[in-house]
Image (cartoon, rainbow, N blue to C red):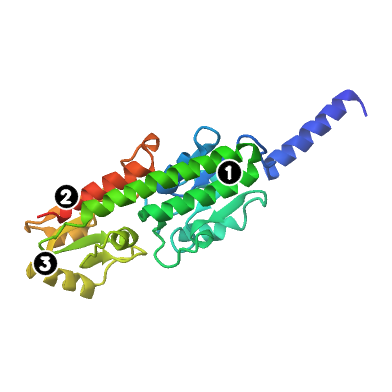
Amino acid sequence: MNTWCCRSWIFCLFSILFVSGRLCASEPQLRVLTTIKPLQLIAAEITGDVQQIDVLLDPRMSPHDYQLRPSDRSKLERADVIFWVGPALEIFLQPVLSSLPQCIQVVSLQQETAAVGDPHLWMDPLLAAAIGHKMADVLGVLAPTHSEVLHANAARLEAALIAENKRLHQQFENIKPPAGYLVAHDAYGRFEARYNLKHLAALTDMADLPPSAQHIAQINSLLEMGEISCVMREPVAPPRVLLTLLKDRQLRVAIIDSMAVEVPLRAGIVEFYRQLGASMQGCLER
């Protein structure tokens, strides 16, 4: 075989490998992908500058009913590690994961942290600390030369979240809302449970399913009786049914950024909880 043939054969073999799959990345640079921005905020705290962190969904999109695009599929296939909550949240992702290259490690944080029930794990600061440690464990095995730094970052994040948790307890302990409050989406349960809060009604459930006519009538009745003093909704455009319910009613409306739409990546997950707490306090105070 002459030199030209050899080179052509190598080029063809390389092309086949490139089209059919890819080689897994090795140390030191891993491509880490999180499904949602709150998880990206946690991962960025753990990795610092030693790994590349990307996010799959635009935070203005709901992970409950998202439709995967071809560009999203490319992101998934380029990743070395994918952190997701699990099928209770990112329903769209479950059928895709089994077809990814075997070298991509996929970590369900709800399963790994044994956080049963409500899939909105990131709404609890102490559970976010546990997620940080799990990320450090996974990445530390894949990038052992960075393991010490990753675990030190996880410990530092845990200390910061414990301090923020204490501050939030103090912030909410004396708040006595004049009436109950309505949430547009039942996504805040873990935050509410942590700080002894409880919404009176939710327009949509944890899976963000559209409300029934009966449910809308029940909420309207609560509004008419003055049982609801404020409404918490997401920063994206509110659903038409909510606008109809609120029409001509004098209620406080708070924007609750549960998906960290307005939180810069460099600000970190602690800033996410500070903004979340401030928004909820503004809605609940007399």
Q: CA distance from mark 2 to mark 1?
A: 40 Å
Residue drawn at (66%, 36%), measured in percent from left and top?
A: 27
| 233 on left or right of 224 | right
Nearer the observer, disc 2 or disc 1?
Answer: 2
Disc 3 residue crowd, few under 14, some 14–19, many 20+, Cα 10 Å: many
Nearest the eye: 250 or 12: 250
Q: CA distance from mark 3 to mark 2?
A: 19 Å
**Residue identified by numbered label 1:** 79
Instruction: Give the residue type that dot 2 points to.
Output: Gly
Q: Please, what secondary structure does the residue beneath circle 1 have?
A: loop
**Residue identified by numbered label 2:** 282
Q: Please, what secondary structure does the residue beneath circle 2 have?
A: helix
Q: Earlier in the sequence, mark 3 or mark 2?
A: 3
Nearest the eye: 54 or 94: 54
**Residue identified by numbered label 3:** 223
Residue 95 visible, this orientation: yes
Nearest the eye: 28 or 253: 28
| 181 on left or right of 40 | left
Residue 73 visible, this orientation: no
| 238 on left or right of 43 | left
Q: Earlier in the sequence, mark 1 or mark 3?
A: 1
Q: CA distance from mark 1 to mark 3?
A: 47 Å
| 108 on left or right of 278 | right
Q: Position of residue 39 (x, y in %)?
A: 44, 48
